[in-house]
Image (cartoon, rainbow, N blue to C red):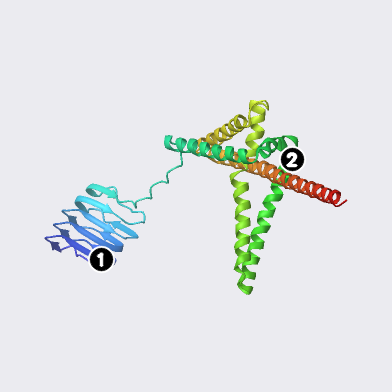
Amino acid sequence: AIGEEAVIGRNAYLSGDVVNASGKVMGDTTITAGKVILGGVYEGDVTIKNNNSLEVIPGTVIRGELIYEGTAGDSIPSGIRSRIYSSAAPVSPAPARRQGITLWGIIKKIFTLLAYYLVALLLYKIFPRFFARSGRIIEASPLASAGIGIAAFGTLVVGCLALIFIILLALLIFNISVFIFSILMIVIAAAVTIFFADIPVSMWIGDKLAGRNKSVPARLAAGLALISGIKLVMDILKAISAISSFARVISSIINIAIWLLGTGALMKSIYEMVRSANMQAETEETRAEEFSADMQQ
């Protein structure tokens, strides 16, 4: 504490739980305390830190600045003679940057779309019948495709649970190969459904936009362009604070619908391809047996 008759000819540094300063300080004053009672005459600046309570006695003279750095609200009498009173508020964290659409972001999306289109064309060259039928499966029965997609999602969930069980089993019997094989199958299934679900939906939309008389690459390009355009618009709307929540909901619904329809068409196409291959193999085997029987006769 500084008494009323005390005179300090230089800077003053005070600290404690409760500080009562009522003298005269010729320099700057720094006070660190939980409770501060301030009076007297201060020729320089007065800085108060870490305080919960500040009481300024009427008649106090501060010729410099009063810098109040506490977290509690201060009460300073309106009649006090002081040149400047300021409160150093705690620095608030910088607001998080909103994810908006930039020119570079649009360019990356375009290049990603082109790369995806080239991969899809490669798959078309390998499995031409798959592409020709994938869009028609959705058109013929969209609800059935969505149902197969839901079933595929359930299968992935069950597969993950089964993988956890296999992990525990592998730890018991040390059969690591079963564990690795299970992980590989689930990863492949998830990758196929996630990365290629857009292809059947794009073919379906491309059939509507370009018509079936157009080539498969043209229909695929039209469908991918429309889907990518819708997703880009959703990204722009999500950056607008007034409608960001609504845009996120709509975007999620669109993505889920594309995934369900596309995954259902993929699963059904793969099933039909495998069944067709099995039937062809059985037919060739039957023909081979008949030919062998004829040769023996």
Which percent across, then down, holds residue 41?
A: 18, 55
The residue positioned 60% from the left and 68% from the top of the image is: 176
Please tell me which residue is depicted at 63% across the width and 47% down the height of the picture.
193
The mark that comes first in sequence, 2 or 1, is 1
Please give the residue where the numbered disc 1 appears in the rendered image. Answer: 15
Which image quadrant: the N terminus?
bottom left
Above or below for 18 versus 232: below
Q: Position of residue 243 (x, y in %)?
A: 54, 37
- Which residue is drawn at the image coordinates 27% and 62% (left, top)? 32
Lateral position of residue 75 relative to residue 60, left or right: right
Q: Between residues 32 and 121, which one lies in front from this camera angle?
A: 121
From the image, tell me which residue sits under label 2: 143
Residue 240 visible to an observer of this rendering: no
- What kind of element bears circle 2? helix
Q: Amino acid at mark 1?
A: Ser
Q: Is residue 119 above or below residue 32?
A: above
Numbered label tally: 2
- In the image, 245 versus 28, the foreground residue is 245
Q: Determine whether the residue tagged by mark 1 lies in a helix, strand or loop.
A: strand
Looking at this rendering, what residue extends furthest in the right direction? 297
Q: Nearer the viewer, mark 2 or mark 1?
A: 2
Which residue is located at x 63 percent, y 74 percent? 172
What is the x, y in percent for residue 30? 22, 59
Residue 265 visible, this orientation:
yes
